[in-house]
Image: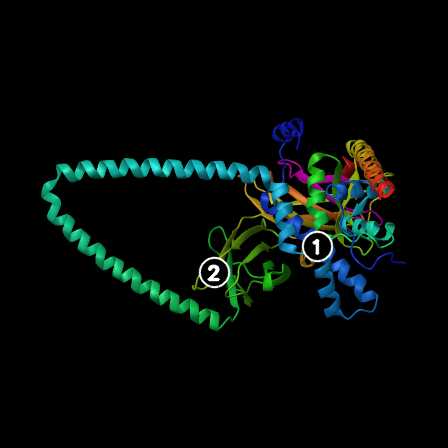
């Protein structure tokens, strides 16, 4: 990269998407390519399994290219993170040095505490022995886990902010796994029971890395999501995921064409929410069918999953027009917004 | 009809030029771009498809192309790329460099044949 291009990239307006959004879009883009490639091969009469194998061979290493795209899109952030990490390490070393010096001074001045110190050492020896014992037990457990790679259950609960369980909450799960070092993305959904409990039975791989994006959504409440990437699984069971949902505000969108006629049949899918406190919550397009809304004959659709002041991101599928993504802020005072096509979404 | 059965390896840097040239035909998603390069070269150039994506993201970062999400022919969400003014200028630069290099290589080949 030339010097002028480097300076422009450093001082240009930063990418507004979060790191997890960028990763999601890369995964979705590569997934689309592979699926289309497989479909075309199947259309040519190639059996499904062979088509999948050939598509992956033609594509090359999904992991490698996915990582290269991440490096391009997140390169600056990675550099900043490295600087921060170096700073944290430097600070830790400084603090460690100061603690060490203080301890040395204390030792030289407090000779009366020598006996207590020896007792402390003995106690630490015992602790070390205990840790070693626990490590052995843990290693044995890991071996057992590898021998029995049964998938684990992901569970959780949903309640209101005052702790009242919420039933019938739609829980959308995107599960990313890398079986045999090949990327795989699947979607699932369940609803919470009358105690607010939900469960995805035996889905999570026991001995492999995985990532999840899980979203809780119920009409009348502000939706929330949690993203987790687990590089190395420990032997413990998966921690339950707890959602506490706030009440939402109803907000109506009306879609009109350039002549002012209402557009019936616009499919509206919430895809992101930025709260006033800066939290980001995501809904993947893949697997979002259960929460998709459609505009009526007045061209209207009512959203009831955002709060006033939230940054709302929606995916729109307009009949006869390409898919559009729109971002806007839910107003504090008004509860309606008119969107005209194609003008409003081209801006 | 395929010209060669073996895969052709691209010269360093020529993938960017092929992508820019392909996008002069209009907005396309990654899969269409690979198919276009394959078919326009009469199935001679068969790049490893995944290698296209880091190149596309890098070129978008340089401002040569722009990306946006849209709907594919199969009615699925897909990322489309289109050429920018900056990309058009870059294509001219890369085409000129390619023709110069091509001419220089031909001169060397002709020279060796004459002496041989």
Position of residue B38 measured from the top left corner of the image (x, y, whole percent): 82, 52
The color scheme shown is: rainbow
Q: Is residue A296 left or right of residue A178?
A: right
Q: Is residue A249 visible?
A: no
Quadrant of residue A128 within the rendered picture = bottom left
| Observer-nearest of A59 and B100 | B100
Query: Could you tell me which quadrant the C terminus of chain A lies in?
Result: top right
Q: Is residue A128 magenta?
A: no
Position of residue A281 measured from the top left corner of the image (x, y, whole percent): 58, 47
Residue occupied by mark 1: A292
Q: Is residue A91 left or right of residue B7?
A: left
- A142 to A5, vertically: above or below: below
Q: Who comes first in sequence, dot 2 or dot 1?
A: 2
Q: Is residue A125 left or right of residue B35?
A: left
Q: Tell me the chain of label 2.
A: A
Q: Tell me the chain of label 1.
A: A
Quadrant of residue A235 within the rendered picture = bottom left
Question: Badge 1: how crowded within 10 Å, few (<14), some, or many (20+)?
Answer: some
Residue occupied by mark 2: A233
Count up the numbered dots. 2
Query: Could you tell me which quadrant the N terminus of chain A lies in?
Result: top right
Q: Is residue A53 visible?
A: yes
Q: Secondary structure at mark 2?
A: loop
Q: Which residues are magenta?
A: A318-340
Position of residue A109 measured from the top left corner of the image (x, y, whole percent): 13, 36
Q: Secondary structure at mark 1?
A: loop
């Amino acid at each position: 990269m030339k010097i002028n291009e480097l300076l422009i990239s450093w001082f240009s307006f930063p990418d507004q998407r979060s790191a997890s959004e960028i990763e999601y879009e890369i995964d979705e883009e590569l997934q689309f390519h592979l699926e289309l490639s497989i479909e075309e091969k199947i259309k040519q009469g190639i059996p499904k399994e062979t088509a999948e194998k050939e598509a992956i061979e033609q594509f090359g290493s999904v992991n490698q290219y996915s990582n290269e795209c991440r490096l391009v899109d997140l390169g600056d952030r990675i550099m900043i993170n490295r600087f921060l990490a170096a700073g944290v390490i430097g600070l830790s070393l400084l603090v460690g040095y100061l603690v060490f010096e203080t301890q040395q001074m204390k030792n030289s001045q407090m000779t009366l505490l020598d006996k207590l110190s020896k007792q402390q050492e003995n106690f630490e020896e015992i602790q070390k022995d205990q840790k070693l014992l626990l490590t052995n037990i843990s290693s044995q457990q890991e071996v057992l886990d590898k021998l029995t790679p049964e998938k684990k259950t992901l569970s959780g609960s949903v309640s209101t902010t005052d702790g009242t369980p919420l039933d019938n909450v739609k829980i959308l799960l995107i599960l990313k796994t890398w079986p045999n070092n090949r990327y795989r993305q699947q979607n699932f959904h369940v609803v919470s029971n009358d105690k607010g409990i939900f469960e995805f039975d035996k889905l999570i791989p026991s001995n492999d890395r995985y990532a999840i994006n899980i979203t809780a959504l119920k009409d009348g409440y502000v939706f929330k999501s949690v993203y987790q990437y687990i590089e190395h699984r420990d032997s413990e069971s998966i921690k339950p995921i707890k959602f506490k949902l706030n009440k939402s505000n109803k907000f109506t969108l009306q879609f009109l064409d350039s002549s002012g006629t209402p557009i019936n049949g616009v499919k509206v899918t919430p895809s992101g929410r930025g709260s006033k406190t800066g939290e980001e919550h995501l809904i993947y397009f893949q697997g979002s069918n259960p929460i998709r809304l459609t505009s009526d004959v007045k061209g209207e659709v009512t959203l009831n999953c955002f709060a006033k002041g939230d940054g709302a991101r929606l995916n729109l599928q307009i009949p006869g027009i390409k898919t559009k993504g729109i971002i806007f802020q839910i107003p504090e005072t008004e509860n309606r917004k008119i969107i005209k096509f194609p003008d409003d979404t081209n801006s | 009809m395929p010209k060669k059965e073996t895969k052709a390896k691209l010269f360093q840097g020529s993938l960017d030029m092929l992508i820019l040239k392909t996008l002069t035909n209009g907005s396309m998603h990654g899969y269409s771009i690979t198919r276009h390069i394959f078919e326009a070269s009469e199935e001679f150039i068969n790049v490893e498809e995944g290698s296209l994506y880091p190149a596309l993201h890098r070129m978008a970062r340089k401002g040569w192309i722009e990306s946006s999400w849209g709907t594919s022919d199969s009615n699925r969400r897909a990322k489309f790329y289109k050429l920018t003014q900056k990309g058009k200028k870059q294509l001219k630069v890369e085409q000129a460099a390619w023709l110069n290099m091509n001419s220089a290589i031909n001169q060397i080949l002709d020279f060796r044949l004459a002496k041989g």
